[in-house]
Image (cartoon, grey):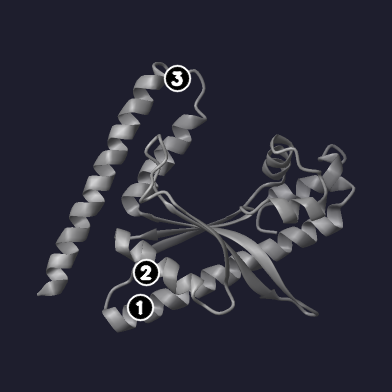
């Protein structure tokens, strides 16, 4: 595993549910890590091909993360799911997370369509928070997909969450995430209001940048 947190489940004071099921849990996490590698490879290939055909890259960067054991347990408890390895795999869709940062809004939809139209990708759910932002101003395109991983003795489909954002959307979301977990903030309502104003400015910036790029490409 890439994260040392996964080693903690084997310690005497580790989460009991995971200590008792350490081997199947670690096996499950390995499969999710393989799913991340599969999706990241697909995205890099699409980016390289697009660059060759259009002389530019639609993807600025790709960030990945594997959900930590305690975060998995807390989410399962919050949602009232049974704490078993089987229930984790069935009910959580965001253990394998891939964030794709794009230059322009239309690149987000281009990359998303290229990915989900591959014949071995199964789209389970799409939430468009760009066309329909959250109340606090959050904007992003979320895909829940299943991707095949090829093990020594089987082919298995694993769920992954892919979030696609522009650079502006990602900067805003990063700040929002930091402030959301900050304790004892003064005037949290005022900060939330200013953040929402920033979200609107980010949206306007993305639109203007898109218009400028479209104008350049017409020439």
Q: Is residue 136 above or below residue 53?
A: above
Locate residue 67 relative to residue 63 in the image: left or right.
right
Tell me the distance, in whole angstroms, between the alpha carbons under discs 3 and 1.
Answer: 44 Å
> Counting residues from the N terminus, which is met first, the one under dot 3 or under dot 2?
2
Q: Does the residue at mark 3 contact the one at mark 1 (Cβ under 8 Å)?
A: no
Residue visible at 86% across and 40% down?
A: 16
Judge depth for marks 3 and 2 and give the one in front. Answer: 2
Give the Cα distance between marks 3 and 2. 39 Å
Front-most of 90 and 30?
90
Q: Residue, x 38% and y 27% (percent of image)?
A: 192
Q: Secondary structure at mark 3?
A: loop
Q: Which mark is residue 50?
A: 1
Q: Residue at position x 62%, y 66% from top?
A: 146
Residue at which label 2 appears: 110
Circle 2 sits in a helix, a strand or a loop, which is it? helix
Please tell me how crowded label 3 is: few (under 14), some (14-19), or many (20+) other residues with Cα within 10 Å. few
Q: Which residue is mark 3?
A: 185
Q: Is residue 134 visible?
A: yes
Image quadrant occupied by the C terminus: bottom left
Q: How many marks?
A: 3
- Residue 43 visible: no
Closer to the camera: disc 1 or disc 2? 2
Residue 79, by quadrant, is: top right
Q: Residue furthest bottom?
A: 53
Q: Quadrant of residue 35?
A: bottom right
For the residues labelled 3 and 2, say whether their Cβ atoms are less than 8 Å apart: no
């Amino acid at each position: 595993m890439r994260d040392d947190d996964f080693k903690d489940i084997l310690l005497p004071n580790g989460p009991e549910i995971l200590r008792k099921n350490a081997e199947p849990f670690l096996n499950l996490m390995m499969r999710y890590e393989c799913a991340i590698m599969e999706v990241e490879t697909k995205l890099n290939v699409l980016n390289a091909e697009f660059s060759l055909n259009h002389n530019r890259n639609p993807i600025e960067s790709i960030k990945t993360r594997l959900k930590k054991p305690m975060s998995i347990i807390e989410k399962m408890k919050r949602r009232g799911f049974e704490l078993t390895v089987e229930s984790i795999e069935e009910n959580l869709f965001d253990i394998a997370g891939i964030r794709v940062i794009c230059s322009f809004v239309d690149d987000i939809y281009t990359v998303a369509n290229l990915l989900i139209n591959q014949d071995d990708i199964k789209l389970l759910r799409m939430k468009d928070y760009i066309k329909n932002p959250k109340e606090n101003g959050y904007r992003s395109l979320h895909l829940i997909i299943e991707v095949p991983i090829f093990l020594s003795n089987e082919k298995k489909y694993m769920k992954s969450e892919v979030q696609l954002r522009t650079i502006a959307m990602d900067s805003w979301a990063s700040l929002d995430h930091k402030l959301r977990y900050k304790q004892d903030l003064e005037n949290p309502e005022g900060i939330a209001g200013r953040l929402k104003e920033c979200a609107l400015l980010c949206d306007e910036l993305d639109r203007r940048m898109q218009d400028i790029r479209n104008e350049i490409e017409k020439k």
